[in-house]
Amino acid sequence: MTGTPLRVVVADDQALVRSGFRMILAAAGVDVVAEAADGDDACAAVRRTRPDVVLMDIRMPGLDGLAATRRIMADPSPALDGRPCRVIILTTFDLDHYVYEALNAGASGFLLKDVTPEQLVAAVRLVSAGDALLAPTITRRLVERFARPAAGKPPPTGDLTTLTPRELEVLRLLARGLSNAELAAALSLSIETVKTHVTRILTKLHLRDRVQAVVLAYESTLITPGVHDSP
């Protein structure tokens, strides 16, 4: 591995989980710069160490991972290279029914706690590079389960009428959990062209990242949970 190692903070109230993740990441050349057992410690560690990525458990004593994520994203401490610190939520999926809220709070993705070592390392690298969607099949399950417009909820702010037909097509597939490579294959485009489309979508809709784009696509009913569009 070349260049500066990625810097990660691991926040989980179980010491065994923290040590296991530390071993896996260290073996892949990723530097775990701090561990935290609750949300307050996680926020302090982020301010102190300025990591690239935070692995954040939701269910912790005191300040939970959801509140900690909101705090970190509201007052971000950029990584040492100036890029924003990104948060990956750790979840058991079936229990953590508010994972969708965590994505809305600013998390860049999520992982199941039974993730394989290879998936953990890949997720940290992907998120640090700015690719917010992880484990597409699980992402689709999560969003389809929780991303349904709530009664009385204010409409989303992004104006989809500013998008071209091609950009709407990209957004529909992006919201299904497709990676840039999968988007390129589905639309017979180069990966660079897909990246350009995604960047323009985020800019036009005033969105921070791909996660917010997914949220908007569902909340605006551009796509409907359980109904799959053909590329």
Image (spheres, helix red, strand yellow):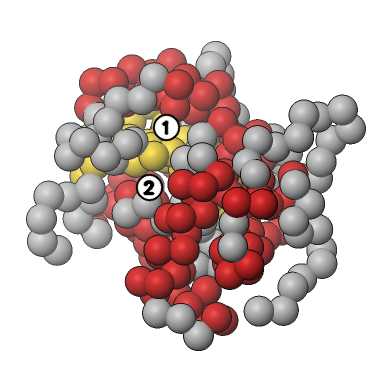
Q: Name the one closer to the observer, 99 or 77.
A: 77
Provide residue 86's location: percent of width, then percent of height. Answer: 39, 39
Q: Which residue is drawn at 40% across and 64% down?
A: 195
Task: Answer few, some or many: residues within 10 Å of disc 1's Cα (few below 14, many 20 plus, some between 14 and 19).
Answer: many
Tell me the amino acid under the disc marked 2. Gly
* Image disc number at residue 11: 1
Q: Which residue is drawn at 47% across and 59% down?
A: 198
The local secondary structure at tag 2 comes to helix
The local secondary structure at tag 1 comes to strand
Judged by depth in the image, the label closer to the viewer, 1 or 2, is 1
Q: Name the one closer to the observer, 44 or 22.
A: 44
Q: Which residue is drawn at 36% across and 25% down?
A: 76
Which residue sits furthest left? 3
Image quadrant for the N terminus? bottom left
Q: In this view, does 80 lie above or below 130?
A: above
Q: Which sits earlier in the primary sequence, circle 1 or circle 2?
A: 1
Q: Is residue 10 above or below residue 120?
A: above
Provide residue 35's location: percent of width, then percent of height. Answer: 33, 30
Q: Name the residue under label 2.
A: 20
Q: Is residue 25 above or below residue 36?
A: below
Q: In this view, does 205 lie above or below 48?
A: below
Task: Answer few, some or many: residues within 10 Å of disc 2's Cα (few below 14, many 20 plus, some between 14 and 19).
Answer: few
